[in-house]
Amino acid sequence: MALDRKDLAILAELTTNARASHTELANKVGLSSTALARRQKALEDDGYIQAYQAALDLAQFGLTTTVLVRIALESQSDEALKAFEAEVVKCPSVVRCFLMSGTDDYILIVLARDIQDFERIHRTELSRLPRVARVQSSFALREVVNRAVPTVVFGEAKR
Amino acid sequence: MALDRKDLAILAELTTNARASHTELANKVGLSSTALARRQKALEDDGYIQAYQAALDLAQFGLTTTVLVRIALESQSDEALKAFEAEVVKCPSVVRCFLMSGTDDYILIVLARDIQDFERIHRTELSRLPRVARVQSSFALREVVNRAVPTVVFGEAKR
DNA sequence: CCAGGATGCGCGTCGGTGTGCCCAAGGAGA
DNA sequence: TCTCCTTGGGCACACCGACGCGCATCCTGG
């Protein structure tokens, strides 16, 4: 299934206003509400739209510190990876975790209130992860770009 | 302003179903639609809810490859940082960019269709960034955790 | 020329939303 | 201890808008 520029406009708008009504979207895209409803439903049914979710302001919850954590395991055996991953998904402060190529085995993104709070997280969450050989943390001083969707997605207009 | 467990339940539900109606949410949380509407509006006005946005399935767009890019600049001067940041925000394939402490100056998260596509991105987007001394890329083999909100946010029940 | 897909218009129904009012609980002060 | 006041909740209602349907139209490709 190919998406034309109107589909992309719909997606671009919904990534900003997920609660926009059919009429509202139809005006912005340049369609009637009927045609828009059909297209939106197709986008949902075909899996382009996964969900509609509220974006929380994490700073409002005091989570102003982002930490990148590089972790190397003692062993790269399948059993070690499984054991580590089974525990890392339980860490409440971890928002992302990648299994990486290269020297580091895993890279985590951790959210903390501040540096002291990260010390607590390091002690209560990270240091309890199994099979860990080395943990290296880097603090993000500033977030320069934060996009949910790369702009390249909306750039390709076809029809 | 302090949030009680019902507020957190509302937020937790809205991060899943941003288009849920007042009645629908009220049933899940255990409130009347009136009380829920008041709370939801308060959460929006107080800035806890930043926006409602559609989550796209990036794999559906062919973006299945995540790359972590570490970048060191020639100079850490304010001018060099500003020049670099002014350009990196324009890169369409970059979804996140952190100014970091430690040896690396910046860490980017880049989305690509595949490894060949990343070669193109490296050539057309990354290599054109100004003041760059060193670029080091690591491929994510798998995404173990991907949360928009750390679960720790919903864990604290107070009232 | 014809057929299929997509669009736009109009309509009716349904549901959500917002308001006003009353009630219950808790805290402060006399 | 009694009372007042504030805060949050629930109920009922009315209005308005969204949503989905049917049908006519248009455009394109065969």
Image (cartoon, coloured by chain):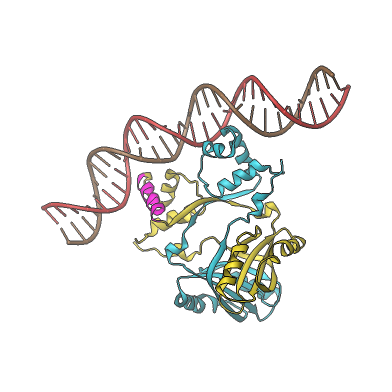
Chain colours: A yellow, B cyan, C red, D brown
Q: Quadrant of residue C29?
A: top right
Q: Name the residue at 66% across, 81% down.
A: B74
Q: Report the quarter where the C terminus of chain A lies.
A: bottom left
- Is most of the magenta stretch helix, strand or loop? helix
Q: Name the residue at 70% across, 73% down.
A: B78
Q: Is residue A30 visible?
A: no
Which is more toward the observer, D8 or B119? D8
Which is more toward the observer, A157 or C28? C28
Q: Position of residue C1 (x, y in %)?
A: 11, 53
* Residue A39 counted in the magenta span: yes
Q: Is residue C5 above or below residue B5?
A: below
Q: Quadrant of residue B100?
A: bottom right
Q: Position of residue B101 (x, y in %)?
A: 71, 72
Q: Quadrant of residue C20?
A: top right
Q: Position of residue B107 (x, y in %)?
A: 62, 72
Which is more toward the observer, B15 or B91? B15
In this picture, which residue range is highlighted in magenta? Answer: A34-46
Looking at this view, name the residue that lies furthest to the front. A79
* Residue A146 counted in the magenta span: no
Q: Is residue A79 above or below residue B27?
A: below
Q: Is residue A46 left or right of residue B122?
A: left
Q: Position of residue B122 (x, y in %)?
A: 51, 77
Q: Name the residue at 66% across, 63% down.
A: A110
Q: Is residue A121 left or right of residue A76?
A: right
